[in-house]
Amino acid sequence: MGTVQEVGTVQEVCTVQEVGTVQEEGVVQEEGVVQEEGVVQEVGTVQEEGVVQEEGTVQEEGTVQEEGTVQEVGTVQKVGLVQEVGSGGGYGTGDGYGTGCGYCTGDGYGTGVGYGTGG
């Protein structure tokens, strides 16, 4: 007597769960406030007095008063506020090129100081 029993049970349970959540939030706020105030006062006062007396005896009295008062007041205020908030990553977050400082802030070419003004 030959009895052959073959019992084969194969169970394959494959569970693949792929949960991908990608959140990208980019918030960029740019606020630029530029105030430019230029005040230039030029006061020029020149007094010239010449007194010449000529008599048989020659008396020469020359009084020359030259008073030159030149006031140059140049006030240039440049306030640049640049706020860049980039959550998630942005180039230059919190800092832009030249934030708070523009080229020649406080001194523009000739601003507040004129070439040869007043004298």
Image (spheres, rainbow, N blue to C red):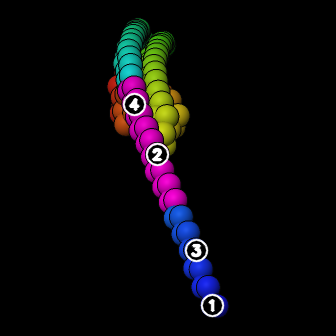
Name the residue carrying label 3.
Answer: 7
- Residue 82: quarter of image: top left
Dot 3 crowding, Cα within 10 Å, few <14, some 14–19, many 20+:
few
Q: Residue at x 37, y 37 (%)?
A: 109
Q: Residue at x 48, y 39 (%)?
A: 88
Name the residue carrying label 1.
Answer: 2
Depth-wise, is mark 4 or mark 3 nearer the camera?
3
- Residue 77: quarter of image: top left
SS for tag 4?
Answer: loop
Question: Is tag 2's residue or tag 4's residue first in the polypeptide sequence?
Answer: 2
Q: Amino acid at mark 1?
A: Gly
Question: Is tag 1's residue or tag 4's residue first in the polypeptide sequence?
Answer: 1
Name the residue carrying label 2.
Answer: 19
State the extent of the magenta-drawn residues as a range.
Answer: 13-30
Tell whether label 4 touches label 2 (CB within 8 Å): no
Residue 92, position in %: x, y? 48, 43
Quarter of the image containing the C terminus?
top left
* Direction bottom: furthest residue: 1
SS for tag 3?
Answer: loop
Q: Amino acid at mark 4?
A: Val
Q: Please say whether residue 119 is visible from this viewpoint.
A: no
Depth-wise, is mark 1 or mark 3 nearer the camera?
1
Give the Cα separation between the discs numbered 1 and 3. 16 Å
Give the Cα separation between the discs numbered 2 and 3. 39 Å
Depth-wise, is mark 2 or mark 3 nearer the camera?
3
Depth-wise, is mark 1 or mark 4 nearer the camera?
1
Name the residue carrying label 4.
Answer: 28
Residue 80, position in %: x, y? 44, 25
Report whether 110 appears left or right of 95. left
Question: Is tag 4's residue or tag 3's residue first in the polypeptide sequence?
Answer: 3
